[in-house]
Each structure stands twice: as C-alpha cells, then as structure tokens.
Image (spheres, coloured by chain):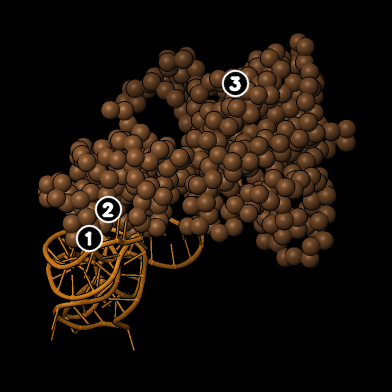
Chain colours: A brown, B orange
RNA sequence: UCCUCAGUAGCUCAGCUGGUUAGAGCGGCGGACUGUUAAUCCGUAGGUCGCAGGUUCGAUCCCUGCCUGGGGAGCCA
C-alpha cells in the first residue's frame, strides 16, 4: 500500500479511505483505553492525529510509542470528534520502526530554548520550529532559481577552490594536501607551494563575483548560488564561517538597474514565502515574533528608500544624536548609524549608494567626481547589510590604477583584468547573504538557527 | 579579537550575604480517567551546583585561570 503524506491528508483528502502514514511521534496522550498520537512526517508543520484503541494493540507496543519514535500506521481517515483537527486516522495496524527511549530522548513535549537545541542540532530538525525554518529555507532556495531562470539568467557554477586571494572580502581558509609533518620549503625557508596539489596557494572561495563577471561578459546575465567561506574570527549572531551567497552579475546594467533588480528580487522572495510557506510563517509569528508577517507584508508594500552616502552622512549629523563612532565624510557607516537610518529615520529598507572609494572594493566603478564609487548597500531592519553590490569598473586603465594604488598583486588577477582589454562593457552585480535574509524572513535572531549545520569559530560538531 | 552577562536535576530556573539532609515547574517513571489537544488529577525517582587551582576549620557560594553559551562591538554577507 502506498504511503500518503500528512500534508495531503490534511488538504481535502477523502474521508473514509484506507490510508498508510509514516512519521515521527510528537506527543502521545492516553485516556483509559484510547491512545491519541500526534504524528508528523515533515511534509507540513501540522500533525495528523492517530486514534488507537488499546484493545486492538499490544500493551507493550503502545508503551513503546513515545515522543520521537518512528512508526507506520494503517487505518481509516475519519472526521475527528475532537475540536482541534478536522480529520484523524483510526488505527488498524501500527508498525514500530524505531523506538525513542523517553528516559534519554532529549526532546520533550514542551518547548526548548534555541540555545539548547543548537547543542543537539542533529535532532532539532524534529521540532516544529526547525521544521518550519528549513522548509522555508528550501522554498527560498527554490524561489531564487525560479526568479532568475524566469528572467533569463544562467546559473553559473563558480569554483569553491580558488587560486586568488585578492578579493579582499576576508580571511580565507587554506586548501592544501601538503604533509604538515614534512612541509617542503624553498631556498628562503618559506613553504614551497609549487609542491602542493595545485602547484600554488589555494583557498576556499570568499565570493564567486570575479568569476561571475567573466560569465556575465558573455552570457549576459548570470547568477551564482553556493557556499562561501570566511575564516574571520567573528563571534556574532550574524556571522558564519560557511554561508550561502547568491551573486547575480549582469552585463549592460548600470547602478540603477542593479538597485531595481535587488529590490524586485528581495520582494519576490518575500512574497514567495508569504504565498508558499504560510503555515510555517504563522507558526513562527505566533511562537517567536508577533510582528513577523506584518513586517514581511510591509516590505512588499513600500519602496525601499534610496539615498547617497553623502546624504546619509548629512542626516546622521543633523540627527542630534551622540554617536559612539564619529560621523564624518570618508568614514564607513557603523552598525549604530545604519540602525538609526533603517529603524528610526526611514523605518524601512534603505539602499545607500556612492560611497567614498577608500572604503569600498577595488572593482567598483569610479564616479565622475573622482571620490566616490557606484556602490550600493541594501540595509534591512534587524540585520543591517543584506546585500552589497556595485556597478563594476569596466575601464581598463581606471581598474589597473586602482589595483596598483591598493598594492594588490595584479599578476594573480590577470584573467580578471583581461576582460577589460577585450570587449569590456558596463556591468553590475550584487551579493545576497542567504542566511542574513532568512533571519529577516523567519524572525530568528541568531544566524546559527537558519542554517542546518552552522560553522562558526571553534564549532564544527555536526 | 575586545567588552559584558551567565553556567545549580533531562529542560527552564529559584536558592545559598561561606556552615551539616540543595528547591520549584515542566519532562521521566507508577497509578487514575471512555475523546485527549503542551490533557487533567494523585504518587514517585532524579544533582561531583561547568572544570582546575587558591583562600578558609569548612567552598555550589569568595579569589584566579580555563572551558562553554548568550548579548554587544569590530570585520563583513
């Protein structure tokens, strides 16, 4: 007999039919000779209620069906006599796949702290909260591909192992097969990477952007979507050593086209979640963050505020606030400044553009003023920078000048610079941190709770 | 990496201004209950008070170091 998923049973499945369900027990309650089991199979946050009359089953079997146990139930779908659910299954056969000894199984019927669940990350999938979060994460990953595919963008697989560490996005993780007990050295006594697997120093990527640009300058519009790695010793609720990033790169887009795409993209994903993850969002809204759904809907209805960096500095100076970090043209905006702009002054997402070139990356296009670059940061309430992007410098000489000004190793970047020698064209792109965005979408406050297996300093347990 | 708070039962926490037998709720276990909904009611077991030193007649409590976790900052996405 074919298994039916709980989600299907709860959405208009014909009552009276014989069905087979398989899943994990969430709770069991018994009244004299009747046992009620709430069964979840991951297909939805909702459980199906199993009604088992004691006389039909062995006492030991019913005793072994505890929170966490995996079972299969064959029975008839019936209208429920209880008030909390429309239908239930009157059990005729129950098969126990795997017991979960209640004396030691760590998950209880009652709620647990997110901190505790992080310590048992191998089991937290079985909770309502993490079921909801990872269903939403899946839906968003799918929506990202759908959005770009529908717009004619190509999914470009940029390398995980990279030979350049010039991007400057952060400390990198080294990739090597050298024997640590017998490291080859050259005449100067330095490590001889020519003996390493790739014949040169290699690292895990911090961004697929530079490679993405190569694709965009031929395929037109591409996006990357994959893991990226930062070896920064960042211990905050917003940083991971391994996180997933989406980086679209578009030929013939200027900074305004870039902003339009970023805003449309974020709204599309938000709308997709509201339309496709309603049950899960409502659960998170009720349990963690009563304003969650309202906030998501607010994002959809209102345009993002767009201001220049120079304008932002003026607003911050005029605020009359005392800042821990000084507000001064040329200095980067600090968390307190961004929060003021987003959460107090505009009370909506803000895109800040045209930053001083000194505080932005080498590849950003220089403005005519010679002082600022066509950069854009999208700031969201609660999480700060969710997107960073720019129009790229397509002028060969200007790009080379900037690389030399910054004393970067132009040899390592020869292939990137080369694209500005042949058929260079205006182009733009941005990077979205998936987990940062999921913090916003789910109302979670710690990034470790929106990725199945968080990688942070001194923690790679699961 | 810096600042700050915390670590007591399986979980969430209270308590001890240094003193003999360490508390609650939930969860677990046993029982009651003919439709429960985080069921309810009665009973019951369960603790090297994060780890290592130090001070002291005596430390879970005070001091030092370390570990782990939370929050904030920096770096960033």
Asked if residue A456 can be seen in this view, the reply is no
Residue to which mark 3 is pinned: A155
Query: Going from the N terminus, do you reach mark 2 or mark 1 first?
Result: 1
Quadrant in the picture for residue B10: bottom left
Dot 2 and dot 1 residues touching (CB under 8 Å) = yes
Circle 1 crowding by C-alpha within 10 Å: few under 14, some 14–19, many from 20:
few
Classify residue B47 as left or right of residue A422.
left
Classify residue B46 as left or right of residue A432.
left
Instruction: Give me the residue at 30% from left, 35% from top.
Output: A18
- Identify the disc placed on residue A186: none
Residue A104 image position (x, y, % from top left):
21, 52
Residue to which mark 1 is pinned: A31
Classify residue A13 as left or right of residue A407.
left
| Secondary element type, mark 1 | strand
Q: Quadrant of the N terminus of chain A?
A: top left
Viewer-closest of A55 and A102: A55
How many marks overall? 3
Residue to which mark 2 is pinned: A36
Viewer-closest of B70 and A128: A128
Q: Nearer the viewer, mark 3 or mark 2?
A: 2
Q: Is residue A166 above or below residue A50?
A: above
């Amino acid at each position: 007999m074919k298994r039916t998923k709980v989600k299907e049973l709860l959405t208009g499945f014909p009552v009276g039919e014989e069905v087979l369900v398989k899943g994990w027990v969430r709770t069991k309650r018994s009244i004299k000779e009747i046992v009620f089991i709430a069964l979840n199979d991951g297909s939805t946050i909702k459980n199906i209620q199993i009604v088992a009359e004691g006389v039909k089953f062995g006492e030991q079997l019913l005793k072994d069906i505890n929170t966490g146990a995996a079972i299969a139930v064959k029975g008839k779908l019936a209208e429920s006599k209880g008030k909390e659910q429309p239908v239930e299954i009157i059990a005729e056969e129950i098969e126990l796949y795997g017991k979960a000894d209640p004396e030691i199984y760590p998950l209880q019927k009652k709620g647990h702290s997110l901190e505790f669940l992080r310590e048992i990350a191998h089991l937290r999938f079985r909770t309502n909260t993490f079921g909801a979060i990872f269903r939403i994460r899946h839906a968003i990953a799918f929506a990202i591909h759908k959005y770009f595919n529908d717009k004619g963008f190509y999914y470009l697989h940029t390398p995980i192992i990279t030979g350049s560490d010039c991007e400057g996005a952060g400390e990198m993780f080294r990739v090597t097969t050298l024997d640590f007990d017998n490291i080859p050295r050259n005449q100067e006594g330095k490590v001889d990477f020519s003996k390493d697997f790739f014949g040169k120093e290699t690292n895990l990527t911090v961004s697929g952007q530079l490679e993405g640009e190569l694709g965009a300058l031929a395929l037109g519009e591409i996006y990357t979507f994959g893991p990226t790695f930062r070896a920064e010793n960042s211990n905050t609720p917003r940083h991971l050593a391994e996180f997933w990033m989406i980086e679209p790169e578009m030929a013939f887009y200027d900074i305004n086209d870039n902003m339009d795409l970023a805003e449309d993209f974020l709204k599309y994903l938000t709308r997709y979640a509201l339309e496709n993850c309603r049950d899960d969002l409502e659960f998170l809204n009720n349990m963690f963050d009563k304003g969650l759904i309202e906030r998501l809907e607010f994002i959809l209805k209102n345009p993002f505020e767009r201001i220049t960096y120079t304008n932002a500095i003026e607003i911050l100076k005029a605020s009359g606030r005392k800042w821990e970090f000084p507000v001064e043209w040329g200095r980067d905006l600090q968390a307190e400044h961004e929060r003021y702009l987003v959460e107090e002054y505009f009370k909506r997402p803000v895109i800040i553009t045209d930053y001083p070139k000194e505080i932005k990356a080498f590849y950003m296009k220089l403005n005519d003023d010679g002082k600022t670059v066509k950069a854009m940061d999208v700031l969201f309430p609660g999480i700060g920078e969710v997107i960073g992007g720019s129009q790229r410098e397509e002028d060969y000489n200007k790009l080379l000048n900037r690389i030399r000004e910054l004393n970067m190793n132009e040899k390592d970047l020869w292939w990137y610079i080369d694209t500005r020698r042949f058929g260079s064209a205006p182009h733009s792109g941005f990077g979205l941190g998936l987990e940062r965005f999921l913090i916003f979408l789910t109302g979670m406050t710690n990034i470790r709770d929106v990725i199945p297996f968080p990688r942070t300093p001194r923690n790679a347990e699961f």
